[in-house]
């Protein structure tokens, strides 16, 4: 909900593509800067406590955004809230990922990755729709920020009920070597490196989500309700595909499926950029979400089956940076190129770049082309 509210309000107040791109940059920079520290905290400290503190900071940031929206506060204060949101997310992601996989038996990792993706996408479908309806009904983004704060408080309460199981915590002395252990692990596991690198660059180049307010208002000529639909479309496709994958037999050729799904993502991104029809644009976003879901499940499974418990926090931190870089820096890249060359060229060029990245990945890491069934890979690894 908050993503829709911020995008709509900033573009309404500034009419600037750069302002939209700055939303992603403000949130991702703290995550990049704090990566090693946040991962180390997740491996050394109480993961549940770290989650609770991070979620509380997110709630406070949402309330502050609500106040700034109501009072028409300075734009730079909105970005200050977004920076603090990035700080909270920097610590939340490694701790929550490490805690969740700590609660799940190894034998269920593949299926759990699918359901985890499904639950996230379900929230991502409902949230943008509620955000768009909230702006339309209330006449501004203020009430949406308040609802986001309430949702964060509900998350806080539900997290309190989780009974954390015993885990192996890092006992290494604090040093740069200990902080960088997650990065070293990812670098030494070439299949994981290939998967998360491809996923990062594909979304970095092919992502059009940050420009949806521009497409909705200036190209498709629709309002905030339709913007909510467009924001939700990607997640609708991802949710549908995730549920489908949960009930289908495991992928027997995960590598080729991964590569072709990203190629398809690039193709539908190009079509979206050229579309002038609201419904065609919706369809392309839905297909893009479905194809993206395949790569998410494969990447999550690979990371989790190969990571020892005492490194989960640090590896999750590295993984979260790749994810954040693809989403948030991708938003900044889209906003910058849209300001320089226009939104259509930005999106179409990004889609073409995504296809090029797939070809490069397949050539640099040929092992990804030969990756078979993830279940067999898990059993061989264990």
Image (cartoon, helix red, strand yellow):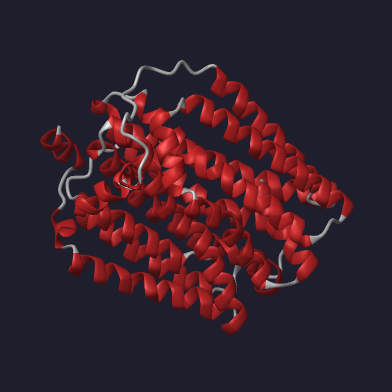
Q: Can residue 223 be seen in this view?
A: no
For this view, does 120 lie left or right of residue 58? left
| Place of residue 260 in the rendered image (x, y in percent of width and height, measured from the top left) | 28, 61
Depicted 215 relative to depicted 114: above or below: below
Depicted 69 relative to depicted 120: above or below: below
Residue furthest left in the image: 380
| Place of residue 78 in the rendered image (x, y in percent of width and height, measured from the top left) | 74, 55
| Place of residue 30 in the rendered image (x, y in percent of width and height, measured from the top left) | 55, 53
Q: In which quarter of the image is residue 204?
A: bottom left
Residue furthest right in the image: 71
For this view, does 146 lie left or right of residue 273? right
For this view, does 171 lie left or right of residue 62? left
Q: Which residue is drawn at 61% across and 41% down?
A: 126
Query: Which of the pair 145/170 is nearer the observer?
Result: 170
Q: Is residue 176 visible?
A: yes
Query: Which of the pair 369/247 is nearer the observer?
Result: 369
Q: Which residue is drawn at 23% across and 39% down?
A: 306
Q: How many marks?
A: 0
Query: Which of the pair 257/370 is nearer the observer?
Result: 370
Residue furthest bottom in the image: 341
Query: Which of the pair 274/373 is nearer the observer?
Result: 373
Q: Which residue is drawn at 25% across and 71% down?
A: 360
| Place of residue 356 in the rendered image (x, y in percent of width and height, measured from the top left) | 31, 74
């Amino acid at each position: 909900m908050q993503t829709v509210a911020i995008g709509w309000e900033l573009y309404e107040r500034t009419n600037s593509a750069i302002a939209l791109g700055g939303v992603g940059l403000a949130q991702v920079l703290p995550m990049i800067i704090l990566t090693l520290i946040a991962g180390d905290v997740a491996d050394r400290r109480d993961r549940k406590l770290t989650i609770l503190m991070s979620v509380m900071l997110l709630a406070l940031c949402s309330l502050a955004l609500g106040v700034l929206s109501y009072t028409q506060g300075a734009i730079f204060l909105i970005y200050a809230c977004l920076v603090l949101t990035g700080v909270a997310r920097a610590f939340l992601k490694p701790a929550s990922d490490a805690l969740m996989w700590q609660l799940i038996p190894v034998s269920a990792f593949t299926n759990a990755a699918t359901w985890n993706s499904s639950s996230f996408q379900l929230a991502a479908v409902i949230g943008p729709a509620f955000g768009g309806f909230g702006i339309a009904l209330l006449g501004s983004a203020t009430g949406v920020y308040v609802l986001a704060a309430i949702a964060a408080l509900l998350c806080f309460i539900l997290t309190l009920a989780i009974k954390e199981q015993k885990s192996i915590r890092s006992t290494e002395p604090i040093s740069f070597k200990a902080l960088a252990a997650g990065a070293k692990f990812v670098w030494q596991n070439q299949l994981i490196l290939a998967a998360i690198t491809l996923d990062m660059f594909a979304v970095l180049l092919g992502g059009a989500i940050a420009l949806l307010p521009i497409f909705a208002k200036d190209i498709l000529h629709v309002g905030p309700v339709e913007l909510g639909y467009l924001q939700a479309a990607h997640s609708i496709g991802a949710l549908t595909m995730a549920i489908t994958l949960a009930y289908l037999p495991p992928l027997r050729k995960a590598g080729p499926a991964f590569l072709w799904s990203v190629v398809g993502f690039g193709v539908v991104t190009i079509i979206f950029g050229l579309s002038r029809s609201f419904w065609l644009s919706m369809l392309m976003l839905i297909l893009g979400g479905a194809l993206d879901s395949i790569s998410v499940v494969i990447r999550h499974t690979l990371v989790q089956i190969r990571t020892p418990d005492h490194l989960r926090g640090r590896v999750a931190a590295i993984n979260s940076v790749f994810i954040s870089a693809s989403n948030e820096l991708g938003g900044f890249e889209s906003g910058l190129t849209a300001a320089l060359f226009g939104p259509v060229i930005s999106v179409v060029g990004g889609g073409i770049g995504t296809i090029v990245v797939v070809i490069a990945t397949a050539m640099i890491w040929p092992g990804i082309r030969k990756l078979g069934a993830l279940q067999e890979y898990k059993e061989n690894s264990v």
